[in-house]
Image: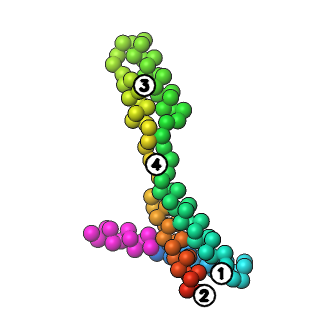
Amino acid sequence: MKQTALNLVMLTSVSLLVALITYIINLWLFSSNSVLFLEGLIFILGGILLLLGSGGINRFSQRTAVIAAATEAIYGKEQPKPSEIFRLDAWKPKGFTRLGLILIIAGILMLVFYFLSF
């Protein structure tokens, strides 16, 4: 429980720092908060995409399937079938959880800053 609370505080503080730095840079460059709304939405969407991550069948999956099939044909040893390799690699999400959460929370904070400034 203590570790979870510490992680939550760190995640929120880093997100607040990112949102404040972006807010200050916006005020310095644009002298207004008009871009803050758009940047908040971009941060939220980028965070969702980072949470989603990437994965699936790629060239390495195909090479593994070919090598497994060739190994079984040459040496006669039982190897995983190519269909099993593709089934296992069909979707292995490799997202950036912390970075995604930081961007989502920072985006929400930026939207709050935008609406509070009016």
* C-alpha span from label 4 to label 2: 39 Å
Looking at this rendering, what residue extends furthest in the left direction? 1
| Labels 1 and 2 touching (C-beta < 8 A) | yes
Q: Earlier in the sequence, mark 3 or mark 4?
A: 3
Image side of residue 21 versus residue 5, left or right = right
Percent x, y of residue 2: 29, 71
Question: Measuring 47% from the left and 28% from the top, which residue is drawn there?
Answer: 64
Question: Measuring 52% from the left and 76% from the top, which residue is drawn there?
Answer: 109
Q: Is mark 4 on a helix, strand or loop?
A: loop
Colour scheme shown: rainbow
Compared to residue 72, the image places residue 63 above or below, namely below
* C-alpha span from label 1 to label 4: 35 Å
Given the image, on which type of amino acid does mark 1 rest? Asn
Percent x, y of residue 46: 56, 61
Given the image, on which type of amino acid does mark 3 rest? Pro
Q: Earlier in the sequence, mark 1 or mark 4?
A: 1
Q: Earlier in the sequence, mark 2 or mark 3?
A: 3
One can see residue 37 in this view: yes
Q: Give the range drawn in magenta.
A: 1-12
Given the image, on which type of amino acid does mark 2 rest? Phe
| Labels 2 and 3 touching (C-beta < 8 A) | no
* C-alpha span from label 2 to label 3: 59 Å
Q: Which of marks 1 and 2 is nearer the N terminus?
A: 1
Question: Measuring 52% from the left and 35% from the top, which residue is drawn there?
Answer: 58
Report which residue position mark 3 lands on. 82
Query: Which of the numbered marks, if any, corresponds to residue 67?
Result: none
Report which residue position mark 1 lands on. 33
| Labels 4 and 2 touching (C-beta < 8 A) | no
Q: Earlier in the sequence, mark 3 or mark 1?
A: 1
Report which residue position mark 2 lands on. 118
Report which residue position mark 4 lands on. 94
